[in-house]
Image: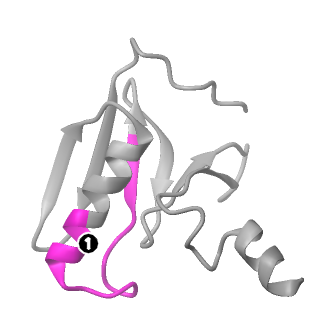
């Protein structure tokens, strides 16, 4: 299953459910969703083991996941957890970024 690029007319909503915090809000871009997630994560004071991933819904269908580092992953598989990186909030600073690792290995 291929999920098409996000069109301007589509309705995108970010959802973050935490025991003490819950947010369901419309967003205009993946970057906005990432920034909102990062603010809620930081406000919670929780670490990676206790702060849940976020989800992005487009027209009511969950299409993306947000990981603890605020990276957004687009679901592309037909089974299980098959995701591709769709948005990296700090691509030049993140140690998990392949370009950063490539520079370190030179």
Residue at the limit of the structure toward the right, as seen here:
106
Figure check: 56 above or below 101? above
Q: Residue at x 63, y 24 (%)?
A: 4
Horizontally, is 78 left or right of 50 in the view? right
Residue 51 position by quadrant: bottom left
Q: Residue at x 14, y 59 (%)?
A: 22
Q: Residues within 10 Å of mark 1 (few under 14, many from 20)?
A: many
Look at the numbered disc 1 and give the secondary structure of its residue.
helix
Horizontally, is 78 left or right of 7 in the view? right
Which residues fall within the magenta stretch?
A: 39-56
Horizontally, is 19 left or right of 63 in the view? left
Out of 47 and 97, give the one closest to the viewer.
97
Figure check: 69 above or below 78? below
Identify residue for label 1. 41
Q: Residue at x 26, y 72 (%)?
A: 41
Q: Which percent across, then down, holds residue 72?
A: 50, 54
Residue at the limit of the structure toward the left, as seen here:
20
Q: Which percent across, then down, holds residue 103?
A: 79, 77
Does residue 42 show up magenta in the picture?
yes
């Amino acid at each position: 299953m291929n999920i098409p690029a996000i069109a301007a007319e589509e309705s995108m909503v970010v959802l973050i459910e935490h025991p003490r915090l819950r947010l369901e809000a419309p967003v205009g871009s993946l970057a906005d969703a990432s920034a909102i997630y990062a603010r809620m994560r930081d406000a919670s004071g929780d670490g990676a083991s206790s702060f849940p991933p976020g989800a992005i819904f487009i027209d009511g269908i969950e299409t993306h996941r947000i990981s603890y580092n605020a990276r957004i992953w687009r679901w592309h598989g037909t089974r299980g957890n098959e995701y591709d990186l769709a948005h990296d909030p700090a691509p030049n600073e993140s140690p998990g970024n392949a370009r950063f690792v490539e520079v370190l290995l030179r």
